[in-house]
Image (spheres, rainbow, N blue to C red):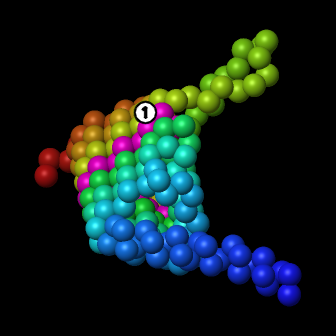
Amino acid sequence: MKKSNMILGIIIPRIIKNIYLMIKFKCFVHPFSSIQGIRNLKIGKGTQINKCSIIAQGKIIIGENCIIDQDVILNSKTGFIKIGNNTSINPQSIIHGNGGVTIGNQTAIAPGVKILKNHLIPNLNNSYSIISEKSTIIGDYVWICANVVIIDGVSIGNNVIIGANSFVNKDIKKNSVVAGCPTRLLYVRTK
């Protein structure tokens, strides 16, 4: 009996919070999504948030008609996350907002993509690894294929395609198709 009461004590407030978000923002939020920090969260009209985890320590702004799929983790940490309109983030992707992450409109993020903070190499006198706080910018009409890792401090231009299993540690110019670990330019798209 105690276990069932404890489970209901966790689930019911979560469902009520998610219903509140649906009414306030005219969007869909899965009843079992784990959302923390709703005061720092703004969701665009028509957006669909499936069963995922959103931790809005800093601001998280999700545009209109977006899809945030199941098992996605959005954690703004010490920065922010801003997602443009008509953008999709597929299952098991993780976005850490240290230093700020901006994702443009009409961008497709495939399953397993990770946009992460970076740890700076500590000096010999300091055993604690300092976390980088650089901004990450991803443009409009970008397609990030499955299992790509993007570290903070990079800028990805508009109309870019990043091949599966790539590691992005430097800026990518607009209209580029890149792949590899680390990424290298395959060709530039003309249309």
Residue 102 lies in magenta, yes or no?
yes
Q: Nearer the viewer, residue 95 or 43?
A: 43
Above or below residue 157? Residue 13 is below
Residue type beneath disc 1:
Ser
Give how far across and how far down residue 23 sits, in percent. 37, 74
Q: Residue furthest left?
A: 191
Q: Residue furthest right?
A: 2
Q: Nearer the viewer, residue 76 or 122?
A: 76
Give how far across and how far down residue 80 sits, in percent. 45, 42
Q: Nearer the viewer, residue 178 or 29?
A: 29
Residue 152 is left or right of residue 32, and the answer is left
Q: Which residues are magenta?
A: 98-112
Residue 62 appears in the figure? yes
Residue 136 lies in magenta, yes or no?
no
Position of the N terminus, as image quadrant, is bottom right
Secondary element at tag 1: loop
Residue 73 appears in the figure? no
Residue at the image position 36 percent from the left and 44 percent from the top: 102
Above or below residue 47? Residue 133 is above
Residue carrying label 1: 135
Q: How many marks?
A: 1
Give how far across and how far down residue 145 sits, in percent. 42, 58
**Classed neighbour count for the residue bearing mark 1: other residues with Cα under 10 Å, few (<14), some (14–19), many (≥20):** some
Residue at the image position 38 percent from the left and 56 percent from the top: 42
Q: Nearer the viewer, residue 29 or 178?
A: 29
Residue 150 is left or right of residue 53, and the answer is left
Residue 131 is left or right of residue 182, and the answer is right
Residue at the image position 54 percent from the left and 67 percent from the top: 52
Above or below residue 37? Residue 65 is below
Give how far across and how far down residue 63 sits, in percent. 31, 58
Magenta stretch: dominant secondary structure: loop
Q: Residue furthest top?
A: 125
